[in-house]
Image (cartoon, rainbow, N blue to C red):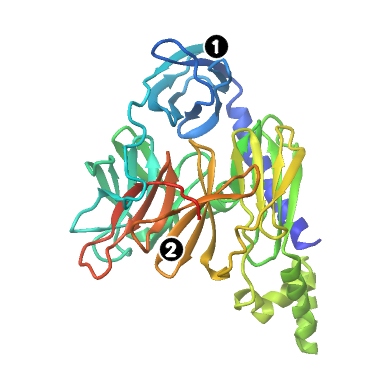
């Protein structure tokens, strides 16, 4: 059995276990039907609808949406649209089969301030205190979740604040969890903390939160592989960072046995080097590679590449070919054959477009990181030239670069995009100031 088949079998077992349990627990469901309008009653289309921060769809041309959810639960339902104020409410399902909800949104009076287009983009300090630094952050409805520390991450705290820096609650990360590393925002909308020795989840309700544990098995098998959900499917991958190929799959929510291959990603030139490592081993090494391959039921060339240390050398880099759902279209950014692939609701390939933004003249400036602004359905690529940081807006329909945003603060770190803003952590050069959280409006200009 090849390593890909082995991983395929492993991931399939995970999802059969995970979602069969989910289906049995959701045997009783109700349909939520809603309509979104302006205060004057005019329907609004393409409003993002979220339940517990998880996108369930968009309003249609009639301003309507619907979703099937379990009964006897309470959800946080929210709307997001660039031209209207966000709206959040608690939705409690009962024994009724259908729930109707009407939402009226307030139009934003000043979406963007009047500015001189030649003026310097002035960033806004959101949260910053002289007695601690911010090392990572995440979003929760209209609040911020912060990973903070006074000195080093061996002793760190989680803080819940609003966008003005008002602190609602703070809890220390248990020492037993090990040194905190970073946040992981999973496809369910949860904020998780990856620590040296364990994984924790932040359970938030209103202005309070709890820190609970997650097993590494649950994280590795149920959360980390899943990229997104849409069109009644879960989209996930079987990527192993030590192998230069992986697959994307989709799994039907209604039938966990409907597990199908979407696309295979492979870096062919790197794969050739990877496979050749076996022939560079001395005879005794080749014999050992064959023995281990037989024991673990994987290809001898995989064993050889791991034995030789090739995957830890300067010649090897893990693959980066992310998948995003933009509206109802699945977009796969394959940087190894220079194309964006578009798939429809039935997971059929619609078309593909050529990309070259990842081949800049200064090749080292491309940082192999894409960001998606869900509210605007925009994709940005990250570039760093020395200390200067910039985002390039990529038209995911054509593959072309539409313009660039240059950060006012150099060395901006931990960048995240939301509602037309770039959020990041920054400590001024040669300053005694701690690391603060900033944001600035993304202003795209021609290169």
Question: In the rendered structure, which disc, 1 or 2, sits on the residue that comes first in sequence?
Answer: 1
**Whether residue 142 is situated above or below residue 405 in the rendered picture:** above
**Whether residue 303 is situated above or below residue 168 in the rendered picture:** below
| Structural distance between the alpha carbons of marks 1 and 2 | 45 Å
Which x, y percent locates residue 92?
A: 43, 19
Residue denoted by label 2: 196
> What residue do we see at 61% from left, 23% from top?
27
| Circle 1 residues within 10 Å: few <14, some 14–19, many ≥20 | some
Q: Which mark is residue 259?
A: none
Question: 156 and 318: which one is in front?
Answer: 318
Asked which secondary structure carries label 2, the reply is loop
Q: Is residue 316 visible?
A: yes
Mark 1 in CB contact with mark 2 (< 8 angstroms):
no
> What residue do we see at 80% from left, 77% from top?
290
| Circle 2 residues within 10 Å: few <14, some 14–19, many ≥20 | some
Position of the N terminus, as image quadrant, is bottom right
**Whether residue 395 is situated above or below residue 88 in the rendered picture:** below
Using the rendered view, name the quadrant where residue 307 is placed.
Answer: bottom right
């Amino acid at each position: 059995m090849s390593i890909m088949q082995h991983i395929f079998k492993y991931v399939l077992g995970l999802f059969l276990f995970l979602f069969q349990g989910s289906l049995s627990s959701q045997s009783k469901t109700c349909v939520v039907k809603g309509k979104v309008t302006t205060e004057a009653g005019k329907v609004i289309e393409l409003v993002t609808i979220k339940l517990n921060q998880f996108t369930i769809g968009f309003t249609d041309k009639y301003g309507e949406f619907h979703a099937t959810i379990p009964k006897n639960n309470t959800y946080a339902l929210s709307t997001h649209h660039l031209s209207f104020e966000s709206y959040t409410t608690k939705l409690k399902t009962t024994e009724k089969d259908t729930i109707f909800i009407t939402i009226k949104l307030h139009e934003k009076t000043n979406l963007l301030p009047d500015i001189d287009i030649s003026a310097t983009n002035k960033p806004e300090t959101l949260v910053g205190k002289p007695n601690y630094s911010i090392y990572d952050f995440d979003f929760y409805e209209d609040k911020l979740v912060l990973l903070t520390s006074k000195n080093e991450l061996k002793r760190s705290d989680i803080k819940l604040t609003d966008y003005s820096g008002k602190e609602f609650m703070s809890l220390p990360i248990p020492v037993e969890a090990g040194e905190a590393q970073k946040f992981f925002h999973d496809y369910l909308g949860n904020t998780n903390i990856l620590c040296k020795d364990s994984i924790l989840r932040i359970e938030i309700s209103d202005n309070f939160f709890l820190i609970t544990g997650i097993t590494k098995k649950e994280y590795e098998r149920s959360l980390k592989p899943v990229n997104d959900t849409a069109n009644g499917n879960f989209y996930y991958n079987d990527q192993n960072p030590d192998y230069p190929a992986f697959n994307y799959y989709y799994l039907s929510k209604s039938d966990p046995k409907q597990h199908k291959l979407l696309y295979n990603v492979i870096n062919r030139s790197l794969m050739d080097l990877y496979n050749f490592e076996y022939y560079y081993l001395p005879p005794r090494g080749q014999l050992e590679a064959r023995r281990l391959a037989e024991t673990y039921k994987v290809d001898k060339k995989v064993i050889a590449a791991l034995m030789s240390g090739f995957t830890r050398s300067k010649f090897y880099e893990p693959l980066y070919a992310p998948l995003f759902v933009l509206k109802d279209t699945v977009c796969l950014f394959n940087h190894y054959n220079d194309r964006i692939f578009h798939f429809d609701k039935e997971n059929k390939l619609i078309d593909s477009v050529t990309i070259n933004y990842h081949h800049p003249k200064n090749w080292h400036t491309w940082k192999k990181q894409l960001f998606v602004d869900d509210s605007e359905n925009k994709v940005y690529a990250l570039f760093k030239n020395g200390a200067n940081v910039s985002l390039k807006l990529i038209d995911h329909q054509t593959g072309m670069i539409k313009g660039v945003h240059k950060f006012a603060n150099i060395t901006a770190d931990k960048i995240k995009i939301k509602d037309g803003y770039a959020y990041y952590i920054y400590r001024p050069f040669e300053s005694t100031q701690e690391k603060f959280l900033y944001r600035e409006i993304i202003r795209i200009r021609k290169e």
